[in-house]
Amino acid sequence: MTQRFSNQNHRLSHFHDHVDVVCPGCGKKATAKADHEKKEVRLYCLHCGYSKIAGTAVEVVGISGHSVMAAHHYFEAELWYTAPFKNEAFVAFNREHLDYLEAYISAMLREHKDRTHFTLLEKLPRFYHEAKNRDTLLKLIAKLKNKK
């Protein structure tokens, strides 16, 4: 169990350009990746070969632009790292996000420097922070890491 966690002040957007999702073709783990320079998002599965590309262009009331959101939203794909927790849902966009949450949850000492009220950890639902949920959440994370 980690003794100390130093908040990196990541925002949720730090993790949303590369998202692990459930493949619409075979139901196994696939990846949705956004490339905002190319203005496209690609969903692909290494298991079954499923591949789909979407653009980031949007038009609202005659005004066009490019949306920047979590990669899975472009395809309405289900997140791979998600599980029910009591009456809530535990979610992570990818393995890096899952590892970050695990480090935070497992820490006995949580250091927060230069809080901005916009960081990922400050926006998490309360159950992620509560010590009474630590062991159950860590078991849930271990289960998600072994999901195939």
Image (cartoon, rainbow, N blue to C red):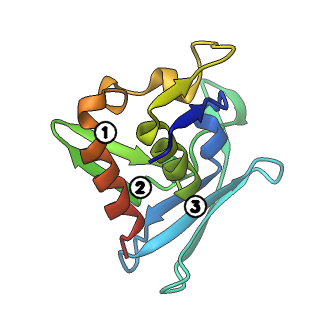
The x and y percentages for residue 132 are 23, 31
CA distance separating discs 3 and 1: 30 Å
Q: Amino acid at mark 2?
A: Leu
Q: Are marks 2 and 3 in contact (CB under 8 Å)?
A: no
SS at mark 2?
Answer: loop
SS at mark 3?
Answer: strand
The x and y percentages for residue 95 are 53, 58
In this view, the residue in front, 30 or 11, is 11
Q: Residues within 10 Å of mark 1 (few under 14, many from 20)?
A: some
Q: To which residue does mark 1 refer?
A: 134
The x and y percentages for residue 24 are 40, 70
In this view, the residue in front, 71 or 95, is 95
Can you tell which quarter of the image residue 10 is in?
Answer: top right
Q: Residues within 10 Å of mark 2 (few under 14, many from 20)?
A: many
Q: Earlier in the sequence, mark 2 or mark 1?
A: 2
CA distance separating discs 2 and 3: 10 Å
Q: To which residue does mark 3 refer?
A: 32
Q: Amino acid at mark 3?
A: Ala
Residue that appears at 31% across and 39% down: 134
Against 49, residue 74 (above or below) is above
Residue pushed farthest right? Answer: 37
**In this rendering, would 64 be left or right of 105?**
right
SS at mark 1?
Answer: helix
**In this rendering, would 141 be left or right of 113?**
left
As drawn, the label of residue 41 is none
Q: Nearer the viewer, mark 2 or mark 1?
A: 1
Residue pushed farthest bottom? Answer: 48
Q: Amino acid at mark 1?
A: Arg
As drawn, the label of residue 79 is 2
In this view, the residue in front, 144 or 37, is 144
Residue that appears at 52% across and 51% down: 99
